[in-house]
Image (cartoon, rainbow, N blue to C red):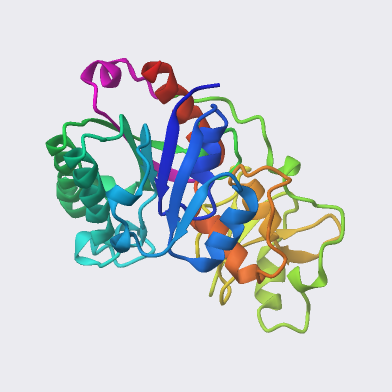
């Protein structure tokens, strides 16, 4: 166990918090604007003070000092799936709210020892690298030493999902940054068979039936069992590498990017919200509030982080802090 503390911004359902908690870090407070995410967060992080509201309304004076400030700030402005506007997009500008809070902590001589950020890998090359250069400069101007790496969940988290994300770690102490080592690749031993239930019935709402307009397209293209497919409006794509395609925030909404399987009884169905959370490394006993509709939970899973990747990075951060 460690004696270090965490504050998290854009906390979502608390995937980053879970990763740091696994190495003994105490999550003191978190901020999230989405009230549905807040419900899920509260159901699973009862000891953390969750501030539900806009980050623009936060003031560092009202927040307890923490050793680690973390945030998976909105990724849509930099994503291939979005318009890639970057900081021209209002959501992209939320990065500067992190910087604003850090400056407020600096004035009070309470800067966190570490800043940990997560985003889509396209942030790194967005606008010919100028966007990420600005991210680095803003952190450097506050006295931080920055290191970053793109990690794939199936290579670094032993979770069978193809998910490349940019991770940024910034230390106030230069020696600590020099001593920090990114986790090594590990063999993927956790197969989709451990997560997807191919044999048992799930709720009938997840199945596609012959009466549905899209069924002929699905039936014609989904030949293999034990594969995960992606339904992308007008075509079906099989992931032949034995992992799940990248989970997205819009899966389960209007048929776009929905991960599908053909089960052992030749039935076609969506993977369930619980299976999506497992494919992000959330524990099997993670509490999904009963009043949340599926589309909300799919969105929460797709927007979240891969918990085990966070855990492995957090372990290396704590090593150098100690």
x, y percentage for residue 123?
A: 28, 50
Residue nearest the observer in this picture, 75 or 69: 69
Asked which quadrant contains residue 111, the reply is top left
Could you tell me which residue is drawn at 72 percent across and 82 percent down? 212
Residue 173 visible? yes
Q: Give the range drawn in magenta.
A: 163-182
Q: Is residue 171 in the magenta section?
A: yes
Instruction: Give percent across and percent down for residue 163.
Output: 48, 46
Image vertical order of residue 282 relative to residue 310, above or below: below
Instruction: Work out whether 145 lies above or below 75.
Output: above
Task: Work out which quarter of the rendered image holds the C terminus and state it.
Answer: top left
In the image, taking residue 296 as reference, residue 119 lies left or right, namely: left
Is residue 198 one of those drawn in magenta? no
Number of on-image labels:
0
Residue 315 in the image: above or below residue 101: above
- The quarter of the picture where the N terminus appears is top right
Identify the image quadrant of residue 146.
top left
Q: In this view, does 264 lie to the left or right of 317?
A: right
Judging depth in this view, the residue of 174 and 294 nearest the camera is 174
Where is residue 137 shown, x and y percent of the image? 14, 40
Is residue 236 in sight in this rendering?
A: no
Residue 45 pos. (x, y %): 59, 47
Q: Residue at the spot x=18%, y=54% of the render? A: 127
| Residue located 51% across and 42% down the image | 17
């Amino acid at each position: 166990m460690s004696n270090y503390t965490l504050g998290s911004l854009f906390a979502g359902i608390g995937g980053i918090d879970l990763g740091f908690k696994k190495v003994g870090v105490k999550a003191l407070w978190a901020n999230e604007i989405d009230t549905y995410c807040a419900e899920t967060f509260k159901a699973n992080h009862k000891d953390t003070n969750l501030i539900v509201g806009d980050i623009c309304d936060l003031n560092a004076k009202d927040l307890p000092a923490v050793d680690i400030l973390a945030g998976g700030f909105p990724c849509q402005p930099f994503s291939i799936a979005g318009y890639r506007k970057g900081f021209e997009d209002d959501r992209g500008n939320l990065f500067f709210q992190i910087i604003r809070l850090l400056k407020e902590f600096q004035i009070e001589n309470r800067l966190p020892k570490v800043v940990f950020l997560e985003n889509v890998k396209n942030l790194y090359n967005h606008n010919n690298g100028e966007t990420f250069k600005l991210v680095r400069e803003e952190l450097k101007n506050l006295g931080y030493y920055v290191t970053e790496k793109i990690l794939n969940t199936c290579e670094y988290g032993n979770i069978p999902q193809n998910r490349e994300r940019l991770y940024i770690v910034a230390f106030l102490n230069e020696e600590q940054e020099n001593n920090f080592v990114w986790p090594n690749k590990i063999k993927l031993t956790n197969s989709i068979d451990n997560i997807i239930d191919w044999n048992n019935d799930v709720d009938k709402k997840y199945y596609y039936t012959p009466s549905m307009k899209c069924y002929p397209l699905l039936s014609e293209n989904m030949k293999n069992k034990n594969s995960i497919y992606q339904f992308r409006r007008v075509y079906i794509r099989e992931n032949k590498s034995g992992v799940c395609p990248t989970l997205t925030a819009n899966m389960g909404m209007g048929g776009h990017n929905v991960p599908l399987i053909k089960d052992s009884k030749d039935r076609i169905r969506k993977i369930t919200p619980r299976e999506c959370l497992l494919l992000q490394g959330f524990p099997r006993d993670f509490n999904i509030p009963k009043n949340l509709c599926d589309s909300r939970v799919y969105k929460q899973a797709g927007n979240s982080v891969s918990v085990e990747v966070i855990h492995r990075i957090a372990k290396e951060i704590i090593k150098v802090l100690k």
